[in-house]
């Protein structure tokens, strides 16, 4: 696949304008490498969407950033600091949170208890209370369903609660792994609106999405990961209107449809 833009995100360069940069990251799970030299940039306050085929290593990229997996080589620079050898906790302390793909709420605990757990490293009760108020304003379901068992909520509602919980440490960078997976169109739309709001509030988001069309539609920048390498980068709009991306990741006849698209349609994978 030809590269249409050298690296539109990297072009916004300097330390303050770049919250995250991956340089030549290689990583794997033992036998063989999954990531084979990933270069990726997240400009501060933007949404970057990573798309690509199943098994390309998208979730693995997020794990190397949050510390679930240590890169074998390369650098993960967060605000200019190489965090690639730090523990997950140390990365959390610096403001990096990871919302995994699988449902991660404790189903038997209340919505409120689940969200409070997002502040597990904080001791200051007044700060925790004020954060609860803030996230309840952003995600009204936290207050509306506060005493409901998290497991009794719909998939879309649970994702909203997971997003609320991820904000309890006031993170600067949120890693979102397929937040729309398994959701109906209405819930999906709501999740993408929330993601847009996170960036509007000044947070940076690295989003992995199978639902490429919706992910690209909300993204300022985007990258295609293929077989452990970044094959293409551009703005969300550029990738959304790229014929080859459309053919591989947006489904048949997508090129004609993308210009007026709303973030609600699912996309088959190439
Ligand atoms: N814990 C693990 N142990 C061993 N191999 C793993 C592990 N997690 C992922 N893999 C392998 O690493 C490769 C990349 O997986 P990854 O989940 O990063 O891909 P992905 O691009 O996110 O794909 P998908 O869209 O299917 O989630 C796959 O071949 C997968 O089987």
Image (cartoon, helix red, strand yellow):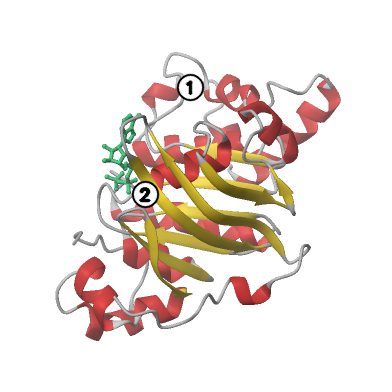
134 relative to 142 in the view: left or right: right
The front one of 31 and 206 is 31
In the image, residue 184 lies at what x, y percent? 28, 49
Q: Residue furthest top?
A: 108
Tell me which image quadrant ligand 1 sits in.
top left
Quadrant in the rendering for residue 258 = bottom left
Answer yes or no: do the residues labelled 2 and 1 have beta carbons within 8 Å? no
- Judging by the rendered image, the residue that carries numbered circle 1 is 148
In the image, residue 27 lies at what x, y percent? 44, 41
- Residue ID at (48%, 38%): 63
Mark 1 surroundings within 10 Å by alpha-carbon count, few (fewer than 14), some (14 through 19), many (20 or more): some
Tally the numbered discs: 2
**SS class, disc 2:** loop
- Judging by the rendered image, the residue that carries numbered circle 2 is 180
Measure the alpha-carbon separation of dots 2 and 1.
22 Å
In the displayed structure, would residue 64 be above or below residue 249? above
Residue 39 visible to the viewer:
yes
In the image, residue 115 lies at what x, y percent? 60, 28
Quadrant in the rendering for residue 80 = bottom right
- Residue ID at (58%, 43%): 139
């Amino acid at each position: 696949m030809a590269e249409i833009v050298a690296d539109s995100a990297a072009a916004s360069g300097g330390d303050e304008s770049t919250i995250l940069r991956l340089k030549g990251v290689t990583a794997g799970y033992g036998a063989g490498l999954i990531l084979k030299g990933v270069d990726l940039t997240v400009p501060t306050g933007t949404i970057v969407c990573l798309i690509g085929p199943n098994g390309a290593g998208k979730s693995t990229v997020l794990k190397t950033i949050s510390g679930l997996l240590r890169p074998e080589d390369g650098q993960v620079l967060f605000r200019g600091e190489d965090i690639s050898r730090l523990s997950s906790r140390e990365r959390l302390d610096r403001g990096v949170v990871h919302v995994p793909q699988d449902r991660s709420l404790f189903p038997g605990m209340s919505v409120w208890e689940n969200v409070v757990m997002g502040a597990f490293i904080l001791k200051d009760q007044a700060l925790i209370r004020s954060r609860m108020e803030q996230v309840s304003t952003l995600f009204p379901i936290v207050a509306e369903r506060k005493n409901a068992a998290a497991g009794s909520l719909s998939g879309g509602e649970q994702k909203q609660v997971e997003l609320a919980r991820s904000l309890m440490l006031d993170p600067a960078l949120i890693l979102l792994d397929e937040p729309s997976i398994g959701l109906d169109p209405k819930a999906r739309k709501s999740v993408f609106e929330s993601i847009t709001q996170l960036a509007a509030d000044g947070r940076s988001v690295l989003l992995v999405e199978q639902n490429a069309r919706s992910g690209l539609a909300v993204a300022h920048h985007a990258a295609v990961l293929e077989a452990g390498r970044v094959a293409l980068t551009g703005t969300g709009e550029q990738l959304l209107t790229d014929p080859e991306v459309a053919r591989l990741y947006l489904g048949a006849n997508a090129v004609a449809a993308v210009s007026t698209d709303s973030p609600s349609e699912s996309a088959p994978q190439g």
